[in-house]
Image (cartoon, grey):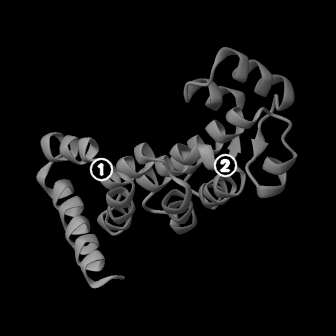
Amino acid sequence: MIVTPEMVREWGGTCGGVAWFEKQYPKGVEITAENVRRCPSTYYNKLWLLKQVAARAKDASAQVAVDMLVELAEPQDAGWLANVVCGCSNLDTDAALARVLAEGDRESLMQVVEKAPVKDAELAARELVKESNPATLAYIESAWPQDRRALVDDAKRKTEREVSRGL
């Protein structure tokens, strides 16, 4: 996919981000791993652009964007990876999910449990139960739809069984 300044504007890029992109790439730029690595953009602008491409591209550049997000995202930015896991179910997001499970904060885990495909949400629910306090679990019980509450309830039961067995 070749991303043009017009696309960045349509996708909701900031005024500064659009101006920078127009200056750097007036005719656009193809999304490849090499081009992303060479891009002198700020870290957050780069993550934002990769997320947009992952969600919108209909060609191989969508997977390149996911893979580059996994490579570039810092541990404190697990939310970017959670967005990809939730919004790009047609792509291979296993590496992004693995990073969210390993490094994600409670909010990122909650996002995956609440919005991702069930197979990914089940894994995130296990981690969420381990990381959450009673207030978070009470919020889930009161606010989430039944199907997603059930994932958390199942994860709680499995965790309790493991604890009782000494695992």
Residue 14 located left or right of residue 154: right
Image point (63%, 61%), residue name? 60
- Please give the residue where the numbered disc 1 appears in the rendered image: 114
Q: Earlier in the sequence, mark 1 or mark 2?
A: 2
Q: Alpha carbon of mark 1 to alpha carbon of mark 2: how far?
A: 22 Å
Q: Hey, what amino acid is under mark 2?
A: Ala
Q: Quadrant of residue 3?
A: top right
Closer-to-camera residue (85/34): 85
Q: Position of residue 42 (x, y in %)?
A: 77, 32
Image point (61%, 56%), residue name? 66
Q: Quadrant of the C terminus?
A: bottom left
Q: How many marks?
A: 2
Which SS class for mark 2? loop
Image point (23%, 48%), residue name? 137
Which SS class for mark 1? helix
Q: Quadrant of residue 39?
A: top right
Mark 1 touches mark 2? (CB < 8 Å): no
Mark 2 crowd level (few <14, some 14–19, many ≥20, 10 Å Cα): some
Q: Hey, what amino acid is under mark 1?
A: Glu
Q: Position of residue 30 (x, y in %)?
A: 76, 48
Above or below, 109 relative to 27? below
Q: Position of residue 101 (x, y in %)?
A: 48, 61
- Please give the residue where the numbered disc 2 appears in the rendered image: 73
Mark 1 crowd level (few <14, some 14–19, many ≥20, 10 Å Cα): many
